Amino acid sequence: MPHRIGRGYRHHQDIQLLRNVYSVLGQSLNPRDYGNPFISLSQVLRDPESLLLDTAKAHGAHTLTKDFKNYYGIKSANHGYTVVIKDNIVTPELPTTCASNTLKGFLPPQTSTVADLLRRGGQIMLAKTNMDEFGMGSHSINSAYGEVHNGTVDGPQGGTALSVGGSSGGSALAVAANLANVGIGTDTGGSIRLPAAYMSLVGFKPSYGMISRKGVVPYANSLDTVGLVAKSVQDVWLTYDILKKPDDNDPTCLSSSSRSRVHYATYARDAALQGNKILPVILNGPRFGPAAPTETPGRYHPRRHPLPTSKGVPKRIGVPLEYNIQEMHPLVRWSWMATLSHLEKAGCEIVPISLPSTKHALSSYYILAPAEASSNLAKYDGVRYGNSRHDHVDDDAANGTTLYSRFRGQNFGPEVQRRILLGTFSLSAGAMDNYFIQAQKIRRMVQQDFDSVFRMPNPLRDNTKVNKQGVDFIVVPTAPTPPPRLKYVRNATPLESYINDVFTVPASLAGLPAISVPGPRHPDYPWRPEVAVGMQLIGQYGDDFNVLKMANDELTNFHKGVVRVRYGKHM
């Protein structure tokens, strides 16, 4: 009997594993037929008989779980489901190149915690997906393996191809094209949420530190977060349930004690809203003590002291005034208003809030992230990683010139070189005080702004209290525009490209959980990929479960049977 990982459960009637695998095997394996989402394919796709046999076994095991029978007969709720992984996450069988010539053909000796947990959960990895080089980009066009695009780039229709977002565009495109059930990527400043919005998918960035980053090639250590993309919140949640484990090999991954503090903060909020005096005591095992210090803590009894819930208390939805920017596309603004109207009809209370530091968040991000990147990428010198240096580069070293500057210039793409130069400058002695230190101060202000508006106290800060007048969630657009055409993206200036992250960066700077879901459709505009709009739900740090639950309960009923990609079937 397999060791089950995660507590998730799927109804046996919802299992369609064989149909999904037949769909994948019945299509072309040439990534160019789908907008170039893959960099390397797993061997399981080259042995369809074995894949079908394993899938049939998993399908049968799921069928036996009716009424929770044979619950431990499967490895997880995702046993047998297919997954694709972004090429900056280390996997045991396939190379990890970060879509860069610098790491071309690099096969690491170890695997990542994420890949290991997915394997233990019985998920089938099909491919490593294309991305912006080292995660630096918002449209997945800065790749050594070619652009990722939604629509054909050749022939008379070549000018109509759309951006898939970035930098995890390959994972999103693979899921949208029915080539995998779940896509795994990373989110540094919106790299999961932006592709999800452009492809009309669900993209989730957990709280920073909830998922281990061991085996994730770093771009910006203090911002990088493993994210998930799928067609439903259920698929995202069940995969997240497998991955949200403590990991001693990653110092940034939350320990068990820190996760207990997170649970305590959620209980404290619900207890305060219900007027409940019973609060959990997190340091003494399964014991609960009263909020008043005069009473003696007693062992928790479910009938005498039921866990506090927020049932009956209306959810408060915050609408930050600073996000209503002039550059917002009219369709995005309409979708935002329609979402808020829908939530109000569902019984939520809509509350205007102010996040004054938001207007500086984007500039702060593009100082901090390149600064960390310039340090992280310093090790790629052609000696320890990647291909061997060319002969003329070695000749330069023999002549006493720089050992690896030409190697880096030849193998790093233009965007990576630009951010390395920007980061190196901001860390220089003459600029650090004026740029890097100021950006760190702005980041702290952004975090404090979020803490001041949420009901739930930040579990990582001491002496914080429940703010009963605060909000439970913040609802904002994921991107200021629908997906742009690639012909405009290619000619855009770096500043114009960076603007796409304006709504996703603040949550990343604060390390908050955020999920992007497809927004409502405008009645006057028939649905097509060109008008895809994503709505973003942001919660307090550690409130990941409630963010997922709110998105599943209230924000996933807008699109039914939409066409996400501009391709037919390739048999």
Image: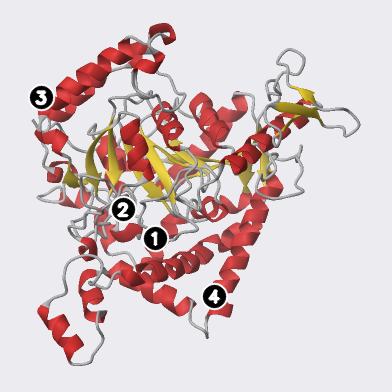
Q: Quadrant of the C terminus?
A: top left
Label 4 is placed on what type of residue?
Answer: Tyr
Dot 1 crowding, Cα within 10 Å, few <14, some 14–19, many 20+: many
Mark 3 highlights which residue?
49
Q: CA distance from mark 4 to mark 3?
A: 57 Å
Dot placed on the residue nearer the N-terminal end, 2 or 4: 2
Q: Quadrant of the N terminus?
A: top left
Mark 1 highlights which residue?
219
Dot 2 crowding, Cα within 10 Å, few <14, some 14–19, many 20+: many
Asked where in the image residue 498 lies, by quadrant, the reply is bottom left
Q: CA distance from mark 1 to mark 4?
A: 19 Å
Label 2 is placed on what type of residue?
Answer: Asn
Dot placed on the residue nearer the N-terminal end, 3 or 2: 3
Mark 2 highlights which residue?
88
In this rendering, is residue 32 above or below 122?
below
In this rendering, is residue 231 above or below 221?
above
